[in-house]
Amino acid sequence: SPQVFDPDTLRRASSAYTKPANFHPSYGTAGFRANASLLPSTVFRCGLLAAARAILLNAHTGLMITASHNPVEDNGVKMVDPDGGMMPQSFEAVAAELANCDDDDAVVAVLRDRVLGEQASCSSPQTLAVLVGHDTRPSAPELLAAALAGVRALNVHARSYGCVTTPQLHFLVRAANQLTPSQDGPGPALPELQVYFDAILGAFSELTPPPLLQQPADGTAAGGSDSGGSGSGGTLYVDCANGVGAEQIQRLVPALQRLGVELRLRNTGDPARGGQLNHRCGADFVQKDRLPPTDFDDVPAGARCCSVDGDADRLVYFSPVGGGGGDAGTATEAGTAAAPAGISLLDGDKVAMLAAVYIGDILNQLPSELLEGIQVCCVQTAYANGAATAYLRDVLRLPTVCTPTGVKYLHEAAHSADLGIYFESNGHGTVLFSEQLLTRLRAAAEGSPAARELLLLSGLINQTVGDAISGVLLVELILSRKGWTLRDWQALYTDLPSRQLKLKVADRGCITTGDAERVCVTPAGLQDAIQRTVEQFPRGRAFARPSGTEDAVRVYAEADTQEQADELARRVAVQVYDMAGGVGPRP
Ligand code: G16
């Protein structure tokens, strides 16, 4: 078979994907992300890198083309490792180096000397593949072609799964590596998307009884509103962000009927309705702006609703409230007036607490010897509402870890426990089970319904990355088990009033942070200024950090009242503007 590394083939392939001269891609919070027109060379080189990692690890890897919550004109790449997790951080520097090469010779040299090393002279393994998926962005076909070309330039098999969610692609990579390697056709044997649904829906159906009641013709089994009565059944309105989730979430319809839940999908990307990806819809919009998404005008106040993002790896729940009530806190561009509030939000913190409460219920029913030495922990970021952190500490009494923003950090921290619950406030997260715990649960499952339940939950919950689809099933299952409405769930604790906003500075790289992004290290003096301001606000807390997915600095503040949280955020934004080279109107 041919050699892995043939410089001439590589140079020729690379010459079709020249990097724009003034483009300097950096590996951000979740991979490379930029305006799609800049990205063909980056995605081609990520194809090379994913193939190289497959060769180095002798296992299948993956690559997801998406810019997730960003606007439709952006795109990006998320790299997937053989276990379905994200590419390790230790590889990010060389990824950035490869992406920044100015010419084809440099691409060849970096790949050979810095990435492949001795493996460059091996013969090409015919059994390895890179699994590729993409979201619904119009730039996907061009970037997909670039990714496939990159993979093939190293003689590795490339398999496109088409339009799938990010968590589905992560799941498939892990599943591919669990298959016995074989080669029937032109490439290695790889799983179909159906294995994903078989796994999570299989676990779900074992966790739920078959439907006992005939659904009423109008589908409103327990009424369209979630505000009264039992939490189970009824209608769940899903905001699909006009992204990749719509088609995939549709497949949950029969499963959720088992709980008497009828799904009504909105923002499904239907061209006739004219909605745009992530534009005034999706989990990021709902969580930050605290407004109902577009396409929800007819949804009644009190209804149970949820929102996923463009690649369906985030999930938040909410309920529209009539008459301008709703939650404290909205996110707007710094300096503009707050929009009228209109939802009661259950963000990622609330999803985490719901999962923690329910898992706690199950743990209490397990035989104590099964739990000996088992560590449970909850991972949050600085964005976690102070009330959520207090609830964890004072009510659930769970150990808590705070990491910087980015699933890659939370995932790693959650892995260090046997049962690691991690969710970012923006709705991205999951629950990880250690092999040690799973082994014990398997052994006990037959005699202990609680062990069986927890074991099935581990199959329902995507173990590779946060997943809105598996998240919806989890939340609906728990609400049904507990007989809770959104109001009951919301009542676990009351969020402190908070506000998030973002502003532009000339170079956001001048802001560096420490202590899990809770303090600004540079520019000099900024942290002191923020600290002095925070001290003037009862129960005040605030921080500023550069975004790793957008050209913006994010500011978060919370305080005793909404007015105070707003004012604290504004003042911190002004300090960032003044001390870190603000651009445009002063907040
Ligand atoms: C990505 C990451 C998340 C992170 C978010 C915002 O989400 O996967 O972990 O919270 O970006 O990051 P930043 O504040 O640095 O812009 P997604 O859904 O866009 O992939």
Image: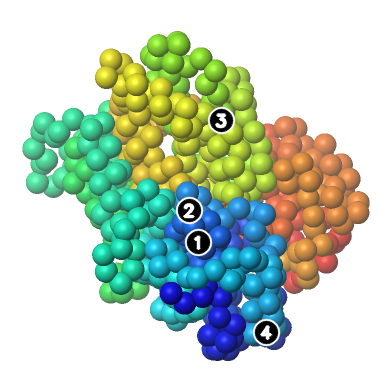
- Type of the residue with mark 2: Pro
Real-space Cα distance between discs 1 and 3?
Answer: 28 Å
SS type, badge 2? loop
Where in the image, quadrant-wise, is ligand 1 located? bottom right
Task: Locate the C terminus and report the quarter of the image it occupies.
Answer: bottom right
Residue at 46% across / 56% down in the picture? 59
Residue 119 visible to the viewer: yes
Against 403, residue 436 (above or below) is above
Task: Locate the N terminus and report the quarter of the image it occupies.
Answer: bottom left
Cβ atoms under marks 3 and 4 closer than 8 Å = no
Cβ atoms under marks 1 and 3 closer than 8 Å = no
Cβ atoms under marks 1 and 2 closer than 8 Å = yes
Q: How is the image coloured?
A: rainbow
The residue that mark 3 highlights is 417
Real-space Cα distance between discs 1 and 2?
Answer: 8 Å
Real-space Cα distance between discs 1 and 4?
Answer: 22 Å
Quadrant of the rendered image containing residue 519: top right
Against 35, residue 423 (above or below) is above
The residue that mark 1 highlights is 54
SS type, badge 4? helix
Quadrant of the rendered image containing residue 156: bottom left
The residue that mark 2 highlights is 82
Q: Nearer the viewer, residue 358 or 235?
A: 358
Residue 132 visible to the viewer: no
SS type, badge 3? loop
Q: Nearer the viewer, mark 3 or mark 4?
A: 4
578 relative position to 220: left or right: right
Q: Earlier in the sequence, mark 3 or mark 2?
A: 2
SS type, badge 1? helix
The residue that mark 4 highlights is 105
Residue at 39% across / 40% down in the picture? 461
